């Protein structure tokens, strides 16, 4: 828990516990448990005329029971999301708790409506639900009221939907206990883990479960269960029954400190606790809401015929052409925000004497060391010297840059992401390079029912460049290799060739690069002495395939395509070597304009050169930060309107046509389902809700406490 959130929790605890102290008379009771149990709002759809005899939902009235929102619900909502809302927008406690109360009321309104709607219409898969069977479920004996309500909600879920909701809840609980256990293991075994804040940025999606995956056999681990009874749960490294039991007790203590456990409950059975039932009830409510939204979308799904889809694309394309030709700043803003859901379909027409090559580049920065940077700061910048003292000094320092594989913390953090590479991995010919990363995402993502997502735009076969030796305590000694700029370019071109996309050098390093003839300046057309940035270009090149084959931007995100393979190779190398961490996990890299930019002049020159060369081109140049390897991932130099919508390709995963069609459909359907959800809530909010705002007045006044 972050320090700020901990402070908020303490503030809540103080307010709720101080009823007997001076100044705390705003509380309704000195008993915290009773205080938490107070009902702050009640929701009952049967108060609407729709459920009266003759009303449109009269026959479904038995499906609706009065929904009660307790002060505990309000507080848990604050701990889960209200605090971050408060910090992000600077809102008062009164406003935040008011928003949370409204949200809980709206949710309860829609959940009650959802049960009625499913009974009347069935779900998107054709399943039907009956009031009599629901009443039979609710009439059974349950350990507490929350468990009874959860069972009633579960009636409206299929076996898989219920199993998925339970799985997600159990994963969440295990994750919280895991955190306590990690701290215990670190303390006892004295592991020298890299702090989480210092671990190398992970690629988006690394070690991430597929959102549809669930394991019905997965269970919460408290330290007493046999490993075979936990399903697919994976224990912490170094976990023992003892460390897990202690972690579980710490977790229970945290619940107890927030009055989320009831006196006398059997904590040996976590899923029998009222707290679990409360969370399960919430999980089932979310599942039912999603289920009805899915039904809404299926009912609203218009016939997305070819003429309609192609028409929308063509209208958007023509509108963008008009807008961008009249407003270049709008185009640049939109291009900078381009994503799988925000498409830029055309570039503005070029202006006179301006290369119209807009595009994106990945920048791999191999930096100066702190000592080298300090030496560069001390260098003279005498523009009257044709050799350019500062440039000459920088050139000498560039010889000494040694790049290293930055992924060492993927071994040494709390999570060891490494796995033994097989013979199909790229090693650069070095026998000691034996590790790859993210086995679950690389090999565990294969197959129809794979548990993990594949990492997008990440080739996944580049071994750690160096050695990593693990001792008997499980700690690593990591020694990365040290690469000159030529070593790195050899690695880059070697990995591209390994992926069957060899690069061709279009401008080799000049023999006098570090001391160019004539220095670093030239005379321009007006007779002024200016920097000759071409003298800084170390090398340029382009993937040979794209010199002889048109670059097809429509295939850029199709796994296995030449376009995506090239992007994936360079992206992986960026994660390996790039110290410009702001460039990691961007859509396609940095947006580059052919006009004057805010980038350093050398970088701007090389980036514009790469973009002008088209996707697959690269340029190498130094700045005062070190070496930059600049690779163009996408360029309007390849085509001013690079995207083509093909209706027949709408189901081919990763194609532009697929991405665009899914976004069009999503916008249409989600807008309709949102409208219908809002209409349902608005229809019943006036007549079916009773609020008791005085019962959480103490929370609203915490700003004054």
Image (cartoon, rainbow, N blue to C red):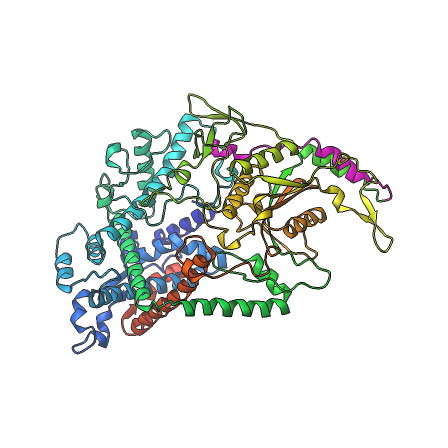
| Relative vertical location of residue 143 with respect to residue 428 in this rendering, above or below | below
Residue drawn at x 26%, y 32% as measured from the top left: 227
Decide if residue 247 is on the left or right side of residue 505.
left
Residue 284 placed where, x, y %? 27, 55
Residue 187 placed where, x, y %? 42, 29
Please tell me which residue lies in front, 569 or 247: 569
Residue 92 placed where, x, y %? 46, 61
Q: Is residue 50 magenta?
A: no
Please tell me which residue lies in front, 513 or 311: 311
Please tell me which residue lies in front, 546 or 250: 546
| Relative vertical location of residue 431 with respect to residue 29 in this rendering, above or below | above
Query: How many circles with numbers are drawn on the protein?
Result: 0
| Relative vertical location of residue 468 with respect to residue 685 in this rendering, above or below | above
Screen quadrant of the N terminus? top left
| Relative vertical location of residue 130 with respect to residue 257 in this rendering, above or below | below
Residue drawn at x 44%, y 48% as measured from the top left: 7
Decide if residue 389 is on the left or right side of residue 6.
right
Screen quadrant of the C terminus? bottom left
Can I make out residue 315 in this image?
Answer: yes
Please tell me which residue lies in front, 450 or 414: 450
The residue at the far front in this view is 548
Can I make out residue 225 in this image?
Answer: no
Residue drawn at x 38%, y 42% as measured from the top left: 445
The residue at the far top in this view is 472
Decide if residue 365 is on the left or right side of residue 241.
right
Q: Magenta segment range?
A: 384-413
Q: Is residue 410 magenta?
A: yes
């Amino acid at each position: 828990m972050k320090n700020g959130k901990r402070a908020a929790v303490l503030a809540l605890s103080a307010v709720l516990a101080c009823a007997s102290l001076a100044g705390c008379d705003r509380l309704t009771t000195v008993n915290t448990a009773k205080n938490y149990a107070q009902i702050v709002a009640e929701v009952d759809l049967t108060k609407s005329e729709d459920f009266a005899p003759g009303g449109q939902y009269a026959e479904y009235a038995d499906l609706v029971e009065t929904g009660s929102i307790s002060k505990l619900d309000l507080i848990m909502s604050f701990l889960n999301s209200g605090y971050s809302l408060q910090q992000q927008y600077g809102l008062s406690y009164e406003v935040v708790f008011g928003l949370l109360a409204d949200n809980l009321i709206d949710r309860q309104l829609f959940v009650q409506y959802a049960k009625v709607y499913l009974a009347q219409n069935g779900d998107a898969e054709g399943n039907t639900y009956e009031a009599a069977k629901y009443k039979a479920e609710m009439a059974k004996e349950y350990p507490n009221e929350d468990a009874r309500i959860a069972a009633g909600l579960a009636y409206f879920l299929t076996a898989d939907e219920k199993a998925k909701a339970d799985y997600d809840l159990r994963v969440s609980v295990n994750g919280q206990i895991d955190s306590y256990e990690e701290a215990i293991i670190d303390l006892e075994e004295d592991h020298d883990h890299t702090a989480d804040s210092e671990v190398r940025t992970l690629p988006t999606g690394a070690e991430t479960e597929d959102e549809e995956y669930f394991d019905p056999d997965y269970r919460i681990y408290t330290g007493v269960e046999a490993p075979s009874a936990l399903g697919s749960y994976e224990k912490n490294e170094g976990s023992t029954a003892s460390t897990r039991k202690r972690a579980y007790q710490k977790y229970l203590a945290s619940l107890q400190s927030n009055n989320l456990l009831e006196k006398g409950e059997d904590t040996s059975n976590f899923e029998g606790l009222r707290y679990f039932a409360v969370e399960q009830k919430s999980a089932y409510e979310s599942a039912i809401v999603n289920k009805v939204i899915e039904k809404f979308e299926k009912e609203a799904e218009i016939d997305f015929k070819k003429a309609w889809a192609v028409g929308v694309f063509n209208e958007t394309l023509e509108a963008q052409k008009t807008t961008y030709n009249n407003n270049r700043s709008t185009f640049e803003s939109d291009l900078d925000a381009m994503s799988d859901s925000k498409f830029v379909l055309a570039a503005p027409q070029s202006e006179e004497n301006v290369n119209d090559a807009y595009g994106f580049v990945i920048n791999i920065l191999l930096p100066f060391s702190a000592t080298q940077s300090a030496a560069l700061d001390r260098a003279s910048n005498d523009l009257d010297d044709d050799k350019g003292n500062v440039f000459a000094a920088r050139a000498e320092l560039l010889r000494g840059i040694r790049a290293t594989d930055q992924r060492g913390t993927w071994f040494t953090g709390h999570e060891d992401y490494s796995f033994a590479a097989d013979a199909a991995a790229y090693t650069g010919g070095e026998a000691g390079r034996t590790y790859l990363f993210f086995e679950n995402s690389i090999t565990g993502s294969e197959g129809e029912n794979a548990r993990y997502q594949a990492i997008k735009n990440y080739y996944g076969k580049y071994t750690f460049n160096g050695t990593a030796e693990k001792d008997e305590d499980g700690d690593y000694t990591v020694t990365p290799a040290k690469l000159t700029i030529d070593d790195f370019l050899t690695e880059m071109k070697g990995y591209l060739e390994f992926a069957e996309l060899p690069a061709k050098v279009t401008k080799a390093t000049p023999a006098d690069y570090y001391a160019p003839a004539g220095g670093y300046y030239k005379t321009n057309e007006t007779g002024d002495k200016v920097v000759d940035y071409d003298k800084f270009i170390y090398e340029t090149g382009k993937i040979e395939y794209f010199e002889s084959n048109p670059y097809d931007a429509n295939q850029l995100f199709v796994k296995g395509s030449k376009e995506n393979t090239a992007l994936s190779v360079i992206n992986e190398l960026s994660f390996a070597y790039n110290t410009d961490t702001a460039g990691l996990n961007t859509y396609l890299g940095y947006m580059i304009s052919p006009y004057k930019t805010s980038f350093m002049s050398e970088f701007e020159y090389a980036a514009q050169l790469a973009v002008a060369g088209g996707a697959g081109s690269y340029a190498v140049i130094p700045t005062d930060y070190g070496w930059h390897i600049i690779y163009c991932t996408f360029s309007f130099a390849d085509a001013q309107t690079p995207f083509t919508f093909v209706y027949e390709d709408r189901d081919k995963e990763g194609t532009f046509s697929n991405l665009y069609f899914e976004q069009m459909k999503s916008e249409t359907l989600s807008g309709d389902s949102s409208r219908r959800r809002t209409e349902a809530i608005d229809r019943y909010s006036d007549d079916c809700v009773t609020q008791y705002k005085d019962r959480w007045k103490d929370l609203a006044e915490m700003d004054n406490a």
